[in-house]
Image (spheres, coloured by chain):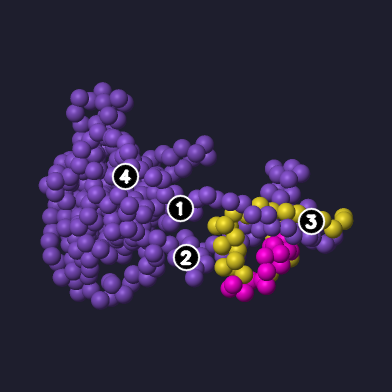
Chain colours: A yellow, B purple
């Protein structure tokens, strides 16, 4: 599976919510937050998240 | 010990508008058992704010009971009343009030007791019109949602003495009525009286109410661009109207993210098939699905993530 660049389209309201989430310490930036979402949702799906 | 402020019996076919001030409790009590009670509530000082079944069932489900609130409609969205006690525990916010049309169309009645007309007659004491009756909270009403997605009414088993205590959190006009459906299962094919008692709440009663947040989105007429109540029936266009929709225009911005091989594999494993080859939409779904699972805790009306 090769590495891949994906370009999401997010409006200002969606970005506002995500930026507030980042400001609360969920991730240092938006790219890292998106990667965290993938990892954790995959772990949820696999039943390996606590 | 609560102080009793008023007591009365609602006879079948009737309702009563009651001024229930903040810190007072309205007890709605079965006399014989098995009687549904429809209920409306208005802000006593601004009748345009009223109890909203849609908001209430969104927050508390289809059968709100002890420990839940009766909310007002957007954009007010205040907790107006709190269900302090509910000894029976089955209420309904799915079904609308029964109406004269229903009894004429389905049963052939020229006139029949019905909750809409009983409510409007009770509300008339305070100058309200039949158009002001709103969707009713139905106490002691057993309903179900079928697998086909339809709501249905079942018989009820409330007994004499079963009661609901509604604590007013703001000054309200509370309007209970004995449901007029004597030829339906709602009240087991019969109409029975209901006892109403108004109490002064004790400090313990008040302390039992969970705190609800005060948010800037809970708007009042002072915040409205059009604060005046329209007083005539004809609708006419405002020639000076300029739209002011919130946050418009909504302009999507590109956000690029480069996934490693491992991340791409994880993403491919969880992306939803409905998006096909559109990875951008699929990843946005992953992102906000994750956000919902981690942060969405607003069922009580509290902000999920605030400032």
Sequence-first tag of 4 and 1: 4
Viewer-side label of 2, 4: 2
Numbered circle sitting on residue B303: 2
Quadrant of the snapshot with the N terminus of chain B: bottom left
Q: Are marks 4 and 1 in contact (CB under 8 Å)?
A: no
Indicate the chain on which mark 3 is placed: A
First to last magenta residue range = A23-40
Tag 2–tag 3 contact (CB < 8 Å): no
Gap in angstroms between the C-alphas marked 3 and 4: 51 Å
Magenta region includes residue A2: no
Whether residue B72 is visible here, answered yes or no, is no
- Residue A36 part of the magenta-drawn span: yes
Residue B42 vertical position relative to residue B112 in the rendered view, above or below: below
Image position, residue B153 (x, y; %): 38, 40
Q: Tell me whether marks 4 and 1 sit on the same chain.
A: yes
User: What residue did someone put label 3 on?
Assistant: A5
Residue at mark 2 shares a chain with residue at mark 3: no
Tag 2, which chain? B
Disc number placed over residue B246 in the picture, else none: 1
Residue at 24%, 39% in the rendered image? B131
**Nearer the viewer's eye, disc 4 or disc 1?**
1
Question: Tag 1 or tag 2, which sits nearer the N-term?
Answer: 1
Judge if badges 2 and 1 mark residues of a common chain.
yes
Q: Are marks 2 and 1 in contact (CB under 8 Å)?
A: no
- Residue B248 shows in the view: yes
Chain ID, mark 4: B
Which image quadrant for residue B6?
Answer: bottom left
Residue with the mark numbered 4: B135
Tell me the chief SS of the magenta region. helix
């Amino acid at each position: 599976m090769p590495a891949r660049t994906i370009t999401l389209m997010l409006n200002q309201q969606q970005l506002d919510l995500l930026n507030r989430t980042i400001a609360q310490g969920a991730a240092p930036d938006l790219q890292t937050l998106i990667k965290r979402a993938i990892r954790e949702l995959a772990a949820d799906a696999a039943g390996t998240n606590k | 010990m609560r102080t009793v402020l008023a007591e009365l019996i609602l006879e079948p076919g009737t309702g009563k508008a009651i001024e229930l001030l903040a810190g007072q409790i309205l007890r709605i009590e079965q006399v014989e058992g098995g009687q549904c009670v429809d209920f409306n509530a208005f802000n006593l000082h601004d009748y345009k704010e009223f109890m909203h079944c849609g908001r209430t069932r969104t927050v508390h489900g289809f059968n709100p009971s002890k420990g839940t609130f009766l909310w007002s409609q957007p954009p007010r969205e205040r907790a107006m009343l709190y269900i302090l006690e509910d000894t029976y525990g089955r209420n309904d916010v799915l079904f609308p009030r029964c109406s004269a049309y229903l009894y004429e169309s389905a049963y052939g009645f020229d006139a029949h007791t019905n909750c809409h007309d009983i409510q409007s007659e009770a509300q008339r004491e305070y100058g309200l019109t039949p158009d002001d009756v709103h969707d009713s909270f139905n106490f002691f009403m057993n309903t179900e949602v079928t697998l086909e997605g339809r709501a249905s009414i079942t018989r009820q088993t409330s007994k004499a003495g079963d009661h609901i205590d509604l604590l007013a959190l703001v000054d309200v006009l509370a309007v209970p009525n004995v449901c007029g459906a004597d030829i339906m299962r709602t009240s087991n094919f019969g109409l029975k009286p209901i006892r109403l008692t108004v109490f002064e709440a004790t400090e313990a009663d008040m302390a039992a109410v969970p705190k609800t947040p005060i948010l800037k989105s809970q708007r009042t007429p002072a915040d409205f661009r059009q604060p005046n109540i329209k007083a005539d029936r004809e609708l006419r266009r405002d020639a000076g109207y300029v739209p002011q929709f919130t946050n418009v225009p909504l302009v999507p911005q590109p956000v690029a993210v480069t996934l490693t091989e491992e991340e791409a594999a994880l993403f491919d494993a969880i992306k939803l098939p409905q998006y096909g080859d559109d990875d951008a939409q699929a990843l946005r779904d992953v992102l906000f699905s994750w956000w919902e699972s981690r942060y969405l805790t607003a069922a009580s009306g509290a902000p999920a993530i605030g400032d």
